[in-house]
Image (cartoon, rainbow, N blue to C red):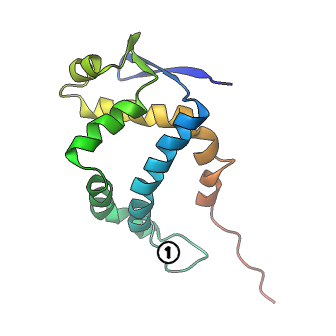
Amino acid sequence: MVKTETKTIDGHEITVTQYTAREGLAIFTKLGKLLSPALNELYKVDDLTKIDTEGAGNILPALSVVLNGLSETEFTPFILRILRSTFIDKKNVTEEIFDMEFAGKYTLLFKVVGFALEVNFKDFFGAGGIGSLRQPRPESPTV
């Protein structure tokens, strides 16, 4: 069943309704293609028993990978697609609302995009899904 969640972000009421399954999978596929190379940059694994916490210092190469994954003409339409079922202060985020509400407020924009992704992919990225991979692996018993 499609759910709706509301949250206040930087003084704005943000409401997100989940995507249908097909739309969610389409967006997830595009995100996976964009983010997986970036995550490889962020979390280089030298030892399979732990993630290199110093890898977080690779944010600029990771960001470069993401930004190079979409052309300038693809980036804004993709963000608008992510926000398709999002409302800011009870206004549907159409192209016109997007241009007016987020002009000069890019931090707000990406917080709202993050919330839209959280609402739609929480079960996959949360503690019950791939998010559990972030937990340290138990040490192997010594024999």
Q: Residue at x 40, y 63 (%)?
A: 37
Mark 1 highlights which residue?
Answer: 45
Instruction: Tell me if 14 is positioned left or right of 97 in this view.
Output: right
Residue 60 or residue 68, whichever sits in front: 68
Q: Residue at x 35, y 20 (%)?
A: 93
Q: Residue at x 19, y 25 (%)?
A: 103
Q: Residue at x 27, y 53 (%)?
A: 67
Task: Specify the quadrant of the image occupied by residue 79.
Answer: top left
Quadrant of the rendering where the C terminus is positioned: bottom right
Local SS, label 1: loop
Quadrant of the rendering where the N terminus is positioned: top right
Residue 36 or residue 11, whichever sits in front: 36
Residue lying farthest to the bottom in this orientation: 143
Give residue 5's position: percent from left, percent from top: 56, 21
Residue 42 or residue 100, whichever sits in front: 100
Give residue 134's position: percent from left, percent from top: 58, 58
- Please count the marks in the image: 1
